[in-house]
Amino acid sequence: MNHLAHQPGLIDPGGRRITYLRLSVTDRCDLRCTYCMAPHTRFVPRPEVLSLEEMARLAEAAALAGVRKIRLTGGEPLVRRGVMTLIEHLGALVADGRLDELTLTTNANHLPAHAAGLAANHIRRINLSLDSLDPGTYRALTRGGDLGRALAGLAAAERAGLAVRLNCVAGPWLDLSEATRLVRFAAARGHAVAFIETMPLGPQADAAPGPDLAPLAEHLKATFDLRPTPADNPAAGPARWLVGPGGTPRVGLIVPSGPDFCAACNRLRLTATGRLHPCLGHPASHDLKPLVRAGADLATLARALAEAVRAKPAHHLMDSRPPDHQMNHTGG
C-alpha cells in the first residue's frame, strides 16, 4: 500500500521528540467522577464535536507527522456511537506500520460488549480507571457507579487477552490500606497499577489535595520489596515504576508536581472538538477543526501539527497558573 512519505518528525523547542497523541473521542461519560467532572457538567453540543471520519483524518495526519502511538480517551471513549469504526480505521494504521501502537483508557463499563473487538483491531493493552475496591467509595467517587460492573469489564478484557494497567487517582479517599489492597489485587491478576497525583484542573482546581505519594511509595516498597526501574526507560512515560521480585507487583507513580515531570514529555492531546493541546497543564491550544472541515489534505494537517509542536512549552503551569480544563474535555 502506498502512503505519503513520513515527515521528519515532531521536535519541540526543547528537543523533545513528540511521538504520542491522546485523542479524546468524546467529552461524554456514563460516570461523573469527582476529580474529572463538575457536578452539573454541560457537554459540548454535538455539532461542535468532530465526526469519526474527521478524527480518523487527523490521526492519519499525526502518523504522517511522526506520531507513533495513539491512545483513545474521553470522557469514556466507548460511549461514542460508532466508535468501533474509528478503532477499525486506526487499527489498520497499526497493521500497515504507520502506527506502532493503539491503546485506550476506559472506565470498563462497556468492555463486555467491546473487549473482543478491541483485541481484533490491534489494541493490545488498555488503561482501566479503578480508584477504589470498596463499593461504597467507588459509588461516591463516580457519583453512582457500580464496582461490580467495572470488575465485569475487567474480566472481559482479561478474556480477550488485553494487557491491563489499573489507574488510581490518589485523592483524599486513598489511604495506605486501600493502596495496598489495590496493589495486591492487581498483582494477583497479573496487572500493573499506577497511582496518579490529583491534578489542579477543572473541578479539582480548588479542591483539597490528595495524599503525598512519597509516603505511599515508601510503604509499598517496604510491603512488597519493590525496587525502581531504570529512570531512562522511554516506555515508562511520565510514571516512575517500582517492581517487585520476579517482576511483580508493578507499581507506577505519576507525580506532575515533581521537578522532572516534563523533561521527557512526548505527547500531545487532541480534544473531541479538534483543539490541540501541546501541554495538559498550559492554556495554549490550537484549533484544527477549521482546517479539517475545510478539507485540508494530510500534508497540510501534518504541518499544522508540527507548527503546534514548535510552540510546546518546556513545563506545565499546574503549580502556579493551572488552566481551566475539565479532564473529560482534554482526555487527561
Image: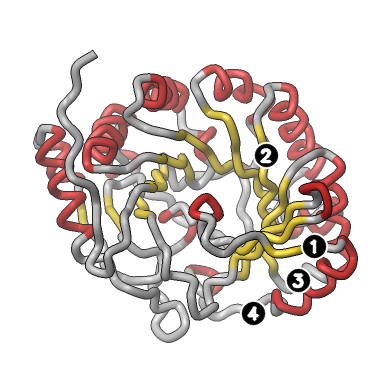
Classify mark 4: helix, strand or loop: loop
In the rendered view, does 102 fall on the left or right side of 6?
Answer: right
Residue 18 picture location, percent across and down: 32, 53
Q: Which of disc 2 and disc 1 is earlier in sequence?
A: 2
In this rendering, the answer to whether 85 lies above or below 306 is above
Classify mark 2: helix, strand or loop: strand
Classify mark 3: helix, strand or loop: helix
Q: Are marks 1 and 2 in contact (CB under 8 Å)?
A: no
Q: Residue at x 42, y 54 (%)?
A: 329
In this rendering, the answer to whether 285 lies above or below 207 is above
Disc 2 marks a residue whose amino acid type is Val
Return the mark for residue 217.
3
Q: Which of disc 4 and disc 1 is earlier in sequence?
A: 4
Nearer the viewer's eye, disc 3 or disc 4?
Answer: 3
Q: Residue at x 63, y 56 (%)?
A: 33
Q: Which of disc 4 and disc 2 is earlier in sequence?
A: 2
Return the mark for residue 164.
2
Disc 3 marks a residue whose amino acid type is Ala
Return the mark for residue 143.
none
State how far apart marks 3 and 1 are (Cα): 9 Å
Q: Which of disc 1 and disc 3 is earlier in sequence?
A: 3
In the rendered view, does 203 fall on the left or right side of 307?
Answer: right
**Residue 292 found in image quarter:** top left
State how far apart marks 1 and 4 are (Cα): 26 Å
State how far apart marks 1 and 2 are (Cα): 20 Å
Return the mark for residue 226.
1
> For mark 4, what is the residue?
209
Disc 1 marks a residue whose amino acid type is Leu
Q: Residue at x 43, y 70 (%)?
A: 262
